[in-house]
Image (cartoon, rainbow, N blue to C red):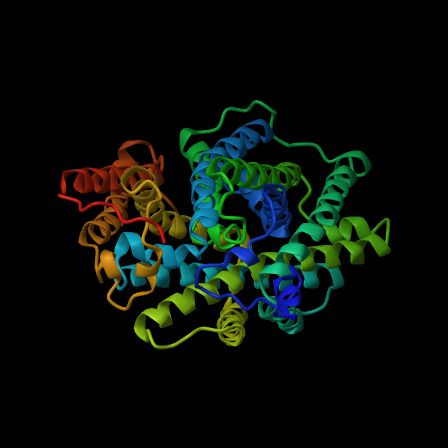
Amino acid sequence: MDIDAPLRNSVLAVEEDTIFPIPADRRRGNTRGLCLVWLGANQNILAILTGMIYCQVCHLSLFWAALAILAGNGVGGMFMALHAAQGPHLGIPQMQQTRGQFGAYGALLVIVVVIVMYVGFTATLLAIGREQVQQALGGPPHQLPVYVLAAAILSLCIVGHGWIERFVVGFTYVAATAFFALAAFFLFYLHALPVQPLMALPSMHDFVAAVSIGVLWQVAYAPYVSDYSRYLPADTPERDAFWSCMTGSIIGTAVPTFLGAYMGSTAWAGNFYAAIHAHYTLPTYVLLGIVLISITVSCTMQIYCAALSCMTLFYTMWPTWRPTARSRGLLAGGLLLLSVLLTIMLSGDILHILNSFIEFLLAVLSPWTAINLVDYYLIRHGDYDIWSFFRHDGGIYGRFNRPAIFCYIMGIVVQVPFISNELYSGLMARQMDGVDLSWVVGILLPGLVYWLICRQADSPARPAVR
């Protein structure tokens, strides 16, 4: 009898699992907990700042901002939640499962892209944290907040999934209460009202750009959403995992984003710490603490999954290597160091930096999410040989899946004529008065082409999942 088994299987034990299938005796949790995780994951200052983009950068009235928030997060949330439903069934990280679509070595292209995404988002969030401290406390900018946040993030990544999940869920209610209180302060105490007429009609370009923000916010979770659902019991219905994840993520994103849109729609141009401090002292520091903890939550989720993706990358290159909990901690530390160095160099208007980064991610993530979902739901119907994901030669999936790689690269290239942003405007975008539909093309076309290629190919009998 293993007397240490209950301790190892406790949700609050240090996580020993890495990229390999989660054993049945360590599957725990339920769909309600999954919903709360994604509610909590989006209760952060980044969501509020992103909400400000709708009115300050995209020039939408508050009514149209609300429509864009709901439409974008609804569309993107559907794709994101379809990935989440894969976690309980396969029990492995999303990037490890990507080897089933792209092949053992072909998947490295996507893995590198998402690691860059994780590091970029973390650096942006750390820069926001540094800026929030400066706004609240005054004085010249300094890097101490970045170092403190990095230490907290690393600690959570070392202990792993169980602690991260409880930390995120527990913080959900605190952050939601604080952000609602902040919006109420602006509305009822400062009497801050939207500058634009509520129903002012935006340009098509601005509205589509705003919808795209919500789509990407959700699609950006797709490469790692199943990393947090893989601990659910294997018999969890895919439909339940889908709806719980989608509901939590859409509501969790839409509410703070709308609060940010409201604040961005007013004539107020200062920082909200100064506005509060003029009337109350203690709430200013409480709000700053909540904001910094929310940044810790978001960055932890990014770095934890980046470490898992790095494990997949290194395991592909050195298949005799066996990743451990210690490996996760060391990789998380290295990725955090890279993020911190990038943060130190990051300066300028945070809203425009964030907006440009979102536009970049949309182009590279859209084709991947289309190929992954078509392969899982329409081609293989979730029927994968899991242990082939861990073979050096890719097992039945091989080293390279040329159709998937072709469709992924094609999906990026075909977006170029439809891109419209501050840096570049493609031919088709100019003919459509600057409306950016690149993400629509980047999802629909590679997904359709990949489905047609796979349907026409002589496919062998699908292997059973084992």
Q: Nearer the viewer, residue 341 or 113?
A: 113
Q: Position of residue 245 (x, y in %)?
A: 54, 41
Q: Quadrant of the N terminus?
A: bottom right
Observer able to see residue 329:
yes
The residue that appears at 44% across and 57% down in the rendered structure is 93
Residue 254 is drawn in which quadrant?
Answer: top right
Q: Nearer the viewer, residue 380 or 349?
A: 380
Q: Position of residue 296 (x, y in %)?
A: 63, 61
Count of numbered circles in the view? 0
In the depicted structure, whether residue 281 falls above or below residue 212: below
The residue that appears at 66% across and 70% down in the rendered structure is 3
Q: Quadrant of the C terminus?
A: bottom left
Observer able to see residue 221:
no
The residue that appears at 38% across and 52% down in the rendered structure is 360
Q: Position of residue 420 (x, y in %)?
A: 35, 42
Q: Nearer the viewer, residue 13 or 214?
A: 13
The residue that appears at 31% across and 63% down in the rendered structure is 108
In the depicted structure, whether residue 242 falls above or below residue 63: below
The residue positioned farthest toward the front in the image shown = 1
Q: Nearer the viewer, residue 211 or 117?
A: 117
Q: Position of residue 356 (x, y in %)?
A: 44, 52
